[in-house]
Image (cartoon, rainbow, N blue to C red):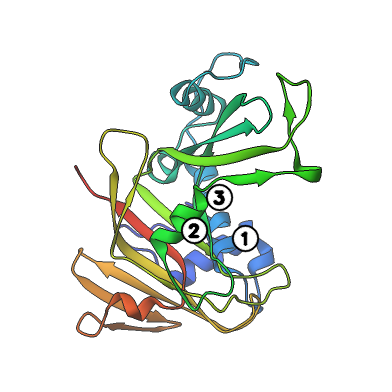
Amino acid sequence: MSSSVRSIGHVNPSQFRSAFIQLEPKFNGCEQQDAQEFLSYVVNDLHDELNKPRSRSRPTTMEPKSAQEAWSIYRNRYDDSKLIDIFVGQYASVIKCSYCGNESTCWDPFWDLPLPVPRNRNRIDIDECIAEFTSAEILDGNEQPFCSRCKQHRRSTKRLSIVRSPKILVIHLKKFSNNGYKLSSDVNVNQQIRIDNGSSTMATYELYGCVCHHGYLSRSGHYTAYCQYDQQRWYHCDDQKVRDCSNSFSMATLKDAYVLFYRQQQQ
């Protein structure tokens, strides 16, 4: 891709698309694609392009005992790129046996946060979606995990928590049901959000970009975007039309938000 796109400071969209569909031909043509899926392909392809191969020790088979150890294993296992430094965070998943109280923890990297959007709610705040993401989930029936202390599958609770905050936080609002229909709930987007990452100070993020989906089905409708330039002016992007909307822009404008981009603020 780097040989096809050589602009400095900006990228020509037509050149970028031409280079991208050489790598991902499924996105060629006029059929509408999912914006979040497209973003994940772009980020993964850029990550592969920017990899810096380096000598590394033999991969360990031992389970990490801390978030830092898990992060070191992850960085050692994969080639290095600026994309990891910018976009990748880490969350902890704690499973607790409801019978004996035994806990097991694993740590995993994430490129974006897929936030659940509750059904049958006319309007919900994005902070509630974040709280829902980190709330306890009951694992029962066929989902019962194996408890190492009880030596059998047990009813358990699972809770996620963010332990490493990325510089750029990408939030994906899960607005579509399994059948492709869009949930009716509107999400109140906040200009600033705070994420508890387990440190003494919470990570503060400022919104600087948003992709909106207009319509009722995942494979139809229309996408637009709002982008902040120079941390001051807001621009509305609708196909080939780009206009300065700073005077009329507000968080209420983003009622159709689908993918959000937040920049971590310096403490």
Q: Which is more toward the observer, 246 or 15?
A: 246
> N-terminal of the two: label 3 or label 2?
2
Label 3 environment density (alpha carbons within 10 Å; few <14, some 14–19, many ≥20): some
Q: Which mark's residue is nearer the viewer, 1 or 3? A: 3
From mark 1 to mark 3, how far is it between C-alphas? 11 Å
Image vertical order of residue 72 relative to residue 93, above or below = above
**Mark 2, residue position:** 4
State the mark number for residue 22.
Answer: 1
Q: Residue at x 57, y 29 (%)?
A: 106
Q: Which mark's residue is nearer the viewer, 3 or 2? A: 3
Q: Position of residue 142 (x, y in %)?
A: 81, 44
From mark 1 to mark 2, how far is it between C-alphas? 10 Å
Q: Which is more toward the observer, 179 or 230?
A: 179
Q: Residue at x 52, y 74 (%)?
A: 121
- Choose top left, top right, bottom left or bottom right for residue 209: bottom left
Image vertical order of residue 213 relative to residue 100, above or below = below
State the mark number for residue 121.
Answer: none
Judging from the image, what secondary structure is the residue with disc 3 in? helix
Q: Position of residue 240 (x, y in %)?
A: 42, 83
Q: Hey, what amino acid is under mark 2?
A: Ser
Judging from the image, what secondary structure is the residue with disc 2 in? loop
Q: Hey, what amino acid is under mark 1?
A: Gln
**Mark 3, residue position:** 45
Please give left or right for residue 94 compared with residue 254 in the image: right
> N-terminal of the two: label 1 or label 3?
1
Q: Residue at x 61, y 47 (%)?
A: 137
Q: Which is more toward the observer, 191 or 86?
A: 191
Image vertical order of residue 111 relative to residue 259, above or below = above
Q: Position of residue 123 (x, y in %)?
A: 45, 75
